[in-house]
Image (cartoon, grey):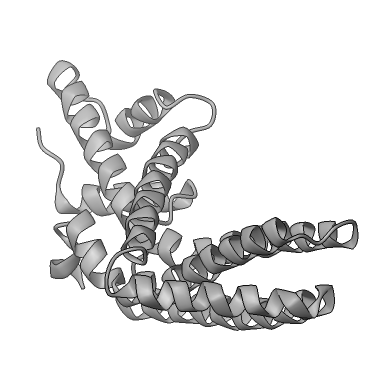
Amino acid sequence: MKLTQDHIQQLFTFTRKHYVEFYDVQTELVDHLANGIEAQWKDSPNLSFNAALKREFKKFGVFGFMDVLEQKQNAMSKTYFKLLLKFTKEWFKLPKIALTITLFLIINWSTKFGKDVFLILLASLLILCLIGVFKLKYNYKKRSEQKGKKWLFESIIFQAAGSNMFLGVLNLINIVNLTSLSISLNFSYLFSFLLTLFIIGAYITLVVYPRQADSLLKKQYPEFDIIM
């Protein structure tokens, strides 16, 4: 006995009701549930669809689909940061290395004007990053509404920027606070290097990643181009 198309749709609805909002994770779970139900029907042909589904769902344990979702999130986050590292490395190769060095020298030059300049610079960056983060959230909501589906990797691309920017700015502010104790030539180089990395990371996260989202999603999900 095989599942009908109506059964498949019920399985998708079932995963959504159990807090799985991403289509790629839903598809994987539906495939797993469908195989499990059909296997049960081989041994018990008279078993109802709902009874077989309940039995299959129990195999996921107390937390249901949450463990599977967490595993997928961890895997996709690793992919995200691997690509982030790859994009960052490109800024230390020709021709972008020239722009990177110029940015570093400008920031290092600004250190000569004291701590207040650092704070103004960081505040300006924070405002720009916040604008970028809100714009990404808006674009993600608009994309999801247009397609009617959400993808896990897409969610990470468009929503991870907020936490990344917050942690980056917080760490830089903590470093600047250290200058109240001591400002040295070595510190100015360290600060300039870290702030240069932060700006590059912010640009990649807020601009480069979103611009390449569709091509990255097509590589990650072969079916993405068809479903779009």
Where does the image place residue 217, in percent across and percent down from the top left? Answer: 25, 63
Q: Is residue 46 above or below residue 121?
A: above
Q: Is residue 29 visible?
A: yes
Find residue 129 and report its image quarter.
bottom right
Q: Tell me which residue sits at (25%, 35%) in the image.
A: 32
Quarter of the picture holding the N terminus: top left
Q: Pick out the residue farthest to the left.
A: 1
Q: How many marks?
A: 0
Viewer-nearest residue: 37 or 155 = 155
Where does the image place residue 123, in percent across and percent down from the top left? Answer: 74, 79
Q: Pick out the residue farthest to the right.
A: 181
Viewer-nearest residue: 65 or 156 = 156
Quarter of the picture holding the C terminus: bottom left
Q: Tell me which residue sits at (39%, 44%) in the image.
A: 78
Left or right: residue 52 compared with residue 141:
left
Viewer-nearest residue: 10 or 206 = 206
Where does the image place residue 122, in percent across and percent down from the top left? Answer: 71, 75
Viewer-nearest residue: 116 or 157 = 116
